Amino acid sequence: MASFFPINEIVNVATIHPFYNSHVKYPPDQAQLALLRQSGQQAVTHWLRWPLLRKDQLYQIIERLYSDDNPDNGYRRSSYISITGGGSGAGLPLLFLTDQQENFNQRIAMGQLMKACKMVEPSDWVLNLHYAGNFYRSLDLSTSTIELAGGSVLCGGHLLPHEKSVDACLRYRVNFLASDTPSLMNFTNYVESLPTEVRSQLRVAKIMYTSESMSPQKQEYLRSVFGPITLFSCLGAAETGPWAVSNLDWSSGLADVEADGPVDFVYDKRSMLVEALSLAVDPHVGSPRSQDWVSEGAKGHLILTSLQRLRNPLVRYVSGDVGSIHPLPRELSTQFAAEMVDHLQVLRLYGRDKRFSFKWLGDYYEFQRLDAVINSPEWGVLQYQIIISNDVVVEGSDKLELRMLRRAESEGILSEAELMERLHDAFYLTFHTEKFFRPVFLSELGGFQRSPTSGKIIRFMDQRGKK
């Protein structure tokens, strides 16, 4: 059974945990946790004054704790170890540790949520192509939650050759694919190249994607290759664990969805407390005032408190995402198990705050505008990466490399020559600047640079000043 903790117990523990109290060296042990749970203090009365927890400060403490093997340090004991973005400067990833039993209980809760919305059903055979290895837990985590929801999983991983993935789909009658978005696009590009008589034998009806958003163009592309599929997603991170699910059909069926492509996720209010901080406030500076929090339905910076983490609490964590909170619509409630409906809420997720720009050769480029242009349907771009670095030939100048994985040229898809013309317009290229611009057309994902910790393809990399 899934288990959740009352907010007052979580805050009580947080008051004597080094994440939140600089005077405390080590987290409380099991005996201290038991006493705190029995004390019944109403620490939640201090909630309005509780500070935000930011990633940079959190990982300074975490790195100290996991590097300290003193027997009195309980942080390292019986922990589920995952990794997150960033680096320690030593070539190894930053770790995030969760109590093993709490982690298992959270997987159970996620499996129940996936089952409740019929995302996973007992008859599903799933080919899981998620990233694995290099300390990354994506394949492990996604497999266990799907199995806890009732599905049967073939653990292929991201290194399984495409031809073997297709053979497995055919031989084992796979009806469900699970993958991170880049690997999914790469596999789909391969499937598109297969003869029609082979593609017609595939029976993929469901796809679960993670790690990146799914643009309408990519959704359309998947359906053009696999046919009428249902697209699902799961929301989670190393810090929060998995906690919300989405069926992309929900976003089109709900009212007031804006044109910039938010996705509606559903989560159990017993598992996560979600707050939204005004977009006019910088969540990385200072402490918010009571008037800085926005009401239900308003867009803001998402601040998260896990109600499934007690040993190492996550309280008012700055997630880095932008979103809004909404009640579960009546028309959507019929898609969930009746006993779950009263506990569910909608998170409308807009993704990371994209309000930033970068400068190249004297011009400023708005990333959100460039992203929209590159993802234009006629460009046929399945994955891209922008890398800016110092030019080794012309001192003081910077070169920009745009790496792209495209679908095969067909009706409605620009030729390479036509795309080059569009690129000139998008990046304001002139006779003097085009020599510093390098488009790279890739045939598979191996040509992209990935995060050394998470294995994710980094959309924008500024390598200026780095050797």
Image: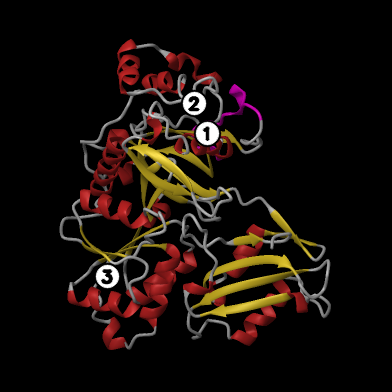
Q: Which mark is residue 204?
A: 3
Say if mark 2 contacts mark 1, CB within 8 Å: yes
What's the amino acid at mark 2?
Pro
Look at mark 1 in the image and give the residue it sits on: 61
Look at mark 2 in the image and give the residue it sits on: 18
Give the foreground label among 1 and 3: 1
Q: Which residue is depicted at the point 56% across and 47% down?
A: 88
In this picture, which residue range is highlighted in magenta?
286-302
Quadrant the C terminus occupies: bottom right
Give the foreground label among 3 and 2: 2
Q: Which residue is depicted at the point 27% across and 38% down?
A: 105
Left or right: 329 as drawn, with respect to 465: left
Label 3 residue SS: loop
Label 1 residue SS: helix
What's the amino acid at mark 3?
Val
**Residue 452 is covered by the magenta coloring:** no
